[in-house]
Amino acid sequence: MKKSVFFAFIIILIIFSMIAVVEAQDFDVGVEAAILVDADTGQVLFEKNADKKLPPASITKIMTLLLAMEEVEKGTVSLEDEVTISRFAESMGGSQIFLAAGTRVKMGDLLKAVTIASANDASVAVAETIAGTYSNFVSRMNKRAQELGMKNTHFVNSTGLPAKGGEHYSTARDISIMARELVKYPQILEWASIWVDYLQLPNRKAMLVNTNKLIKDYPGMDGLKTGHTDAAGFCLAATARRDNMRLISVIMNANSEREREEVTARLLDYGFNTFSKELVIKKGAQVQNIEVPGGKKTVTVAEAANDLYVLVKRGTKSSLTKKVIIKEDLKAPVKKGEILGKEVVLQDEKVLGEVNLIASEDIEKAGLLTRLWRAFVNWIGSLLKNVLG
């Protein structure tokens, strides 16, 4: 009897250990690098080798599209502008819509071709139009990457076509950063959601077929950009929205088109099924007793500048904690709306999100006599404490 109980206990331990291993390996995805983030906050839900420098192939075009849409937003370029196709743009290999040098095509149509069909020739035509020269545009790509905090990225072209010497590279994390910026433009998501379309070019129509097959297969997916070269393998930066959550996944160097689709679907499923989006701090929520050194008032009330949402694993919201961090150099005078510090939300000591705390009122600097009196009182208090304690 004792032996049977012992063996049953051993079997149970083995089963539980196997379950634990399966769960631990459940997201050890087979691609070389991957990341899953919340589009709104940038909160990372999963990562693997997210900072490893790898060739990004046509995912590069996310930056091309971003720079173009930013210029459209500024009004310096219009989607209706006619773009003259250069011989250099015509000469591009790989994915293309076979633009002819000397013809004129609307900027919006070129961007649509880049988004849906990953057209290299259209990408170059866009770049030349926006920056004057192709080299200028590539410089702007790298400058914008630095501004966005993409620390491990360097571009040498706008297409993602193979570059000598490994000088064209990015990381899953950096790609997610520029993807978060691009999804702010509804027009891009509208184009990226199209499966098949036709573009009217001078004297002919060009068929545009979306390079991202998950657009028609994965619920809620509306972007974003595929990539493939021999050096880069199969890559995909994807985005999908369900209810109040938009997620962005990036995978790099998958072995096949099928693998990049399966891994992307698994990553997004993991995010949507495992996490819920929670409002943890409301805009205007108050933090009391913020000390303001040197002010007429010595304490004030700070307010949350914005709503703060975080993604938490379902059923774990109760384990969240909050921490208030005030600026070390805070002192009077203070203007209403001035940032006094931040409130951080943590789970298991990991920061999930933070929101600025702003002053709810003006606080003038105390006069010299008031400050001297306070210094004297503090000195007396300190002296008594040392004597008595």
Image (cartoon, rainbow, N blue to C red):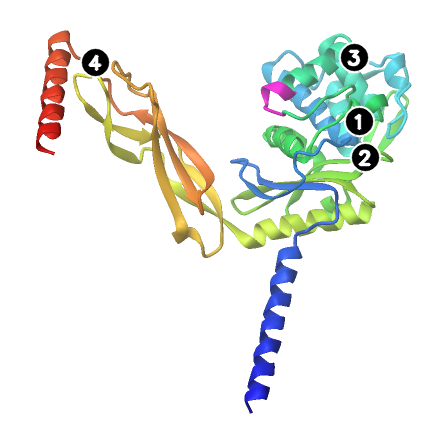
Of the numbered discs in the image, which one, if any, rests on residue 70?
A: none
Q: In the rendered structure, which disc, 4 or 1, sits on the residue that comes first in sequence?
A: 1
The residue that mark 3 highlights is 134
Which region shows up in magenta?
A: 145-150
- Please state, as top left, top right, bottom left or bottom right, where the N terminus lies in the image: bottom right
Q: Residue at x 63, y 24 (%)?
A: 151
- Front-most of residues 176 and 321: 321
- Please state, as top left, top right, bottom left or bottom right, where the C terminus lies in the image: top left
As measured in the structure, the alpha-carbon distance from the residue carrying label 4 to the one carrying label 3 is: 53 Å
Contact flag, marks 1 and 2 (Cβ < 8 Å)? yes
- Name which residue type carries label 3: Tyr
Q: In the rendered structure, which disc, 1 or 2, sits on the residue that comes first in sequence?
A: 1
Of the numbered discs in the image, which one, if any, rests on residue 232?
A: 2
| Between marks 3 and 1 in the image, the one whose residue lies nearer the viewer | 1
Give above or below for 112 relative to 47.
above
The residue that mark 4 highlights is 364
As measured in the structure, the alpha-carbon distance from the residue carrying label 4 to the one carrying label 2 is: 59 Å
Contact flag, marks 3 and 1 (Cβ < 8 Å)? no
- Name which residue type carries label 2: Ala
- Name which residue type carries label 4: Glu
Q: Which quadrant of the figure has residue 295?
A: top left
Asked if residue 252 is among those painted magenta in the image, a careful observer would answer no
As measured in the structure, the alpha-carbon distance from the residue carrying label 3 to the one carrying label 2 is: 23 Å
Residue 368 spot, x, y in % from top left: 15, 8
Of the numbered discs in the image, which one, if any, rests on residue 160?
A: 1
Which residue sits furthest bottom? 1
Give above or below for 133 relative to 248.
above
As measured in the structure, the alpha-carbon distance from the residue carrying label 4 to the one carrying label 1 is: 55 Å
